[in-house]
Image (tube, helix red, strand yellow):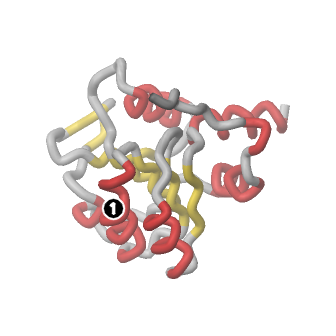
Amino acid sequence: MEACKLPDYQKVPSEAFEIVRKTRTIALVGASPKEERPSHRVMKYLLEAGFEVIPVNPGQKEILGKKCYPSLSAIPEDKEIDTVVIFRRADLVPPIVEEALARGVKNIWLQEGIVSEEARRLAEASGARIVMGFCFKKVHQLEEARRA
């Protein structure tokens, strides 16, 4: 059995830093109300860091005081989304990416441990940028440290 290989945060693509710098509103797919889940901790951090976070989880009405939506397409059209951050298994990612692209989202971010070549093809074919396998929170922390 192969051990889970953590990404090398010394090799974060410059595009990932650019996405983090330019993002204000994030739709977080796979948001969880459970404090022990990475998606919960990341969402809490992002809110505290000043991002607007829209949680997406069909089983929840609200997470961390924010209205939760069952899908990206259920988020009102007047809510601009800069980046979709995805906390879902790789095999579930392509339809989420298609939904994000249909909304006109230009930045797709698959969290640490999530890689989908099909998602990459979909994003690139539509002119969207995609980051895979890095944690948005950790890249934001690196960006903040670089600026300090």
Q: Tell which residue pokes out farthest to the top in this image.
A: 36
| Residue at 30% in and 61% down | 72
Q: Secondary structure at mark 1?
A: helix
What residue lies at 50% left-to-right and 60% top-to-bottom?
A: 108
Q: Position of residue 51 (x, y in %)?
A: 53, 43
Q: Is residue 79 above or below residue 6?
A: below
Position of residue 76 in the picture relative to residue 118 (left or right): left
The answer to whether any part of residue 54 appears in the image is no
Q: Is residue 75 above or below residue 104?
A: above
Q: Which residue is mark 1?
A: 96
Which residue: 50% across, 73% down? 121
Q: Name the quadrant containing residue 8.
A: top right
Left or right of 20: which side holds 124?
A: left
From the viewer's perspective, is residue 118 above or below residue 20?
below
The number of discs equals 1
Residue at left 20%, top 52%?
70
- Which amino acid type is marked by label 1? Ile
**Please, is residue 88 above or below residue 7 in the view?**
below
Q: Position of residue 138 (x, y in %)?
A: 63, 33
